[in-house]
Amino acid sequence: MSEVLTFIPQWQILIFSGLFGAAWGSFANVVIARWPLEMSVVRPGSHCFSCQAKVRPWDNIPVLSYFILRGKCRHCGASFSLRYVFVELLLALFSVAVMQRALALYPDAPGWLLGTWLIWFAFIWALVVVAMIDLACWLIPDSIVLPGIAVGVAANALGLLPLGWLEPVVAAGIAYAGLRLLFIDGYQLLTGKPGMGLGDAKLLALFGAFLGYEGTLFALFAGAFQGLVVGLGMVLFRRRKGLDNEPVFEEDLGEDGAPTEPTDDRLRKAKVPFGPFLAAGAIEYLFVGEALIAHYTKWVFYLTLRWFS
Ligand SMILES: [Zn+2]
């Protein structure tokens, strides 16, 4: 252990990373609420969307304030969405989890520890924001994904992440082009209907920049599988509601290529964008991907041996 890290007990480092994650979760909520409205994320300060009253700093403590105020505005009593506390808690947990990984990787090098923790947390922060915005309004913001691709490539090139400079660049390119050819242009050609959105292709390029070939493939398959399971659930749900002629995934695109929002409220509840599943796949790869792939490889190897012997 280095001098710095033996001086600070590990539990204090973990608590600090949890508070840091919750604070950035709070900012994530601001971005998620304002990006779709094209509002600045800095000005004006936090205010109630119902009565416009300013939220005082002591009413703006991540997680805690939500419970103290019971999820309601102090002035007008309007309810805040559970999403606020969910995003704050989620990012606090991810921050702690990534810190734990970084502590295991770099117990002796505080600089590397900080860098690794921050870069993985930034990646997860972006994924959570993108997933929540996609869920709410069916758009994947370029203003987060495109700079993210540059950050991922730079982090790998500088050695903060392990892939070097070539693999992230190639993986991002292949991911974008591959998804576009197969699931957007190819799908359109075969079925005459638009498939996924371009935002999904850019999101996959972001995975390429951070995770390389293996992680991007993993995220795509894990995301597709989870999307399929949820999609099937939706189909059953809709059949019961008599909505089974409507597509489950975001297929109705407007003239500008952006998905149009469903007007029927029941349908809105029964349709899901694909971005959140991809984002979940990428986060799963970060935490369990290598273990899962190793397990699966062993299993395939074992079956192959049995087959041939
Ligand atoms: Zn209010």
Image (cartoon, helix red, strand yellow):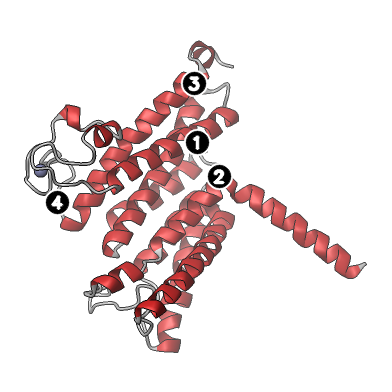
Q: Amino acid at mark 3?
A: Trp
Mark 1 highlights which residue? 97
Q: Is mark 4 within 8 Å of ligand 1?
A: no
Relative height, residue 278 to residue 124 (above, below) = below
Mark 4 highlights which residue? 39
Q: CA distance from mark 1 to mark 2?
A: 9 Å
Q: Earlier in the sequence, mark 1 or mark 4?
A: 4
Q: Residue at x 49, y 43 (%)?
A: 157
Q: Measured from the top left, where is residue 124 in percent x and y?
A: 42, 45
1 and 3 marks in contact (CB < 8 Å): no
Mark 2 highlights which residue? 287
Q: Measured from the top left, where is residue 49 in percent x and y?
A: 12, 48
Across the whole image, how many numbered discs are drawn on residues? 4
Q: Earlier in the sequence, mark 1 or mark 3?
A: 3
Q: Amino acid at mark 2?
A: Phe
Q: CA distance from mark 2 to mark 4?
A: 34 Å
Q: Measured from the top left, where is residue 221 in percent x and y?
A: 55, 64
Relative height, residue 277 to residue 45 (above, below) = below
Mark 3 highlights which residue? 11
Nearer to the camera, 197 or 135: 135
Nearer to the camera, 273 or 142: 273
- Tell me the element at label 1: helix
